[in-house]
Image (cartoon, grey):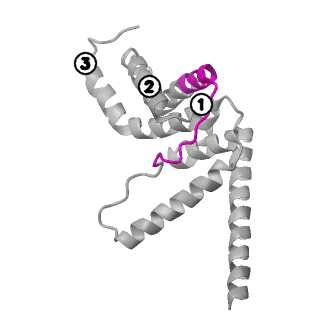
Amino acid sequence: MKHEGQPGNSEWVGAAMERFEGPLLRYAARITGDLERAQDVVQDTFLRLCCEDHTRLDGHLAEWLFTVCRRRALDVQRKERRMESIDDLELAEPASLELSPATLAEQRDSTSHVQRLLATLPVNQREVVCLKFQNGMSYQEISRITNLSLGNVGFLIHTALATIRQRLHAEEKLAANSHRRNL
């Protein structure tokens, strides 16, 4: 159902693009494994939004966008049947210009380290962690986007964080032992 004549529709879509294009692009890139395919998925998502009645999506816009984006990205992934690394894709939000170069470098190193740890998790854990922490989604929104139960979403997030915590602790212990041997 088209609603092009609806007052404010183009402004509403423009505001949605401004707010959600970056997060959707990162989300789609994680699923497809390719930035160009992710861009196509996000473009298609916003084209579909143009055809929606914004009053119908009031209060559920983020959930609707991520659900449409996820379905489209999974379709593309199934069609392409290939996964590529997205290590060169910067998944962190742009850093503030007020930070020192040393602080920026440290943040980049930390972000890269967390991304490497995330990459070792199973796909379903990575997806829910990214929706929660990169995109600020609630467990209920994640549940509706992924078609997982609330309990499963909570379990996956808890398991993912426990695994990352365990791996960080093991790395710290290894580094401390190595440092002691070098003294």
Q: Secondary structure at mark 3?
A: loop
| Magenta-tinted stretch | 72-90
Q: Is residue 106 left or right of residue 175?
A: left
Q: Amino acid at mark 2?
A: Asp
Q: CA distance from mark 2 to mark 3?
A: 27 Å
- The image position of residue 102, as x and y in percent, is 40, 72
Mark toward the start of the polypeptide (2 vs 1): 2
As displayed, is residue 134 above or below residue 14? below
Residue behind mark 2: 40
Mark toward the start of the polypeptide (2 vs 3): 3
Q: Amino acid at mark 1?
A: Ile
Quadrant (top left/top right/bottom left/bottom right) for the N terminus: top left
Mark toward the start of the polypeptide (1 vs 3): 3
Residue behind mark 1: 145
Q: Are marks 2 and 1 in contact (CB under 8 Å)?
A: no
- The quadrant in which residue 156 appears is top right
Nearest the camera: 35 or 64?
A: 35
As displayed, is residue 172 above or below residue 62? below
Q: Is residue 45 left or right of residue 126?
A: left
Mark toward the viewer: 1 or 3: 1
Nearest the camera: 82 or 121?
A: 82
- The image position of residue 100, as x and y in percent, is 34, 71
Graded by Cα atoms within 10 Å as few (under 14), some (14 to 19) or many (20 or more), the crowding at tag 2 reads some
Residue at 68% x, 87% y: name it: 182
Magenta residue check for 160 = no
**Name of the residue lying farthest toward the front:** 182
- The quadrant in which residue 179 appears is bottom right
Graded by Cα atoms within 10 Å as few (under 14), some (14 to 19) or many (20 or more), the crowding at tag 1 reads many
Magenta residue check for 89 = yes
Mark toward the viewer: 2 or 1: 2
Residue behind mark 3: 7
As displayed, is residue 3 above or below residue 39? above
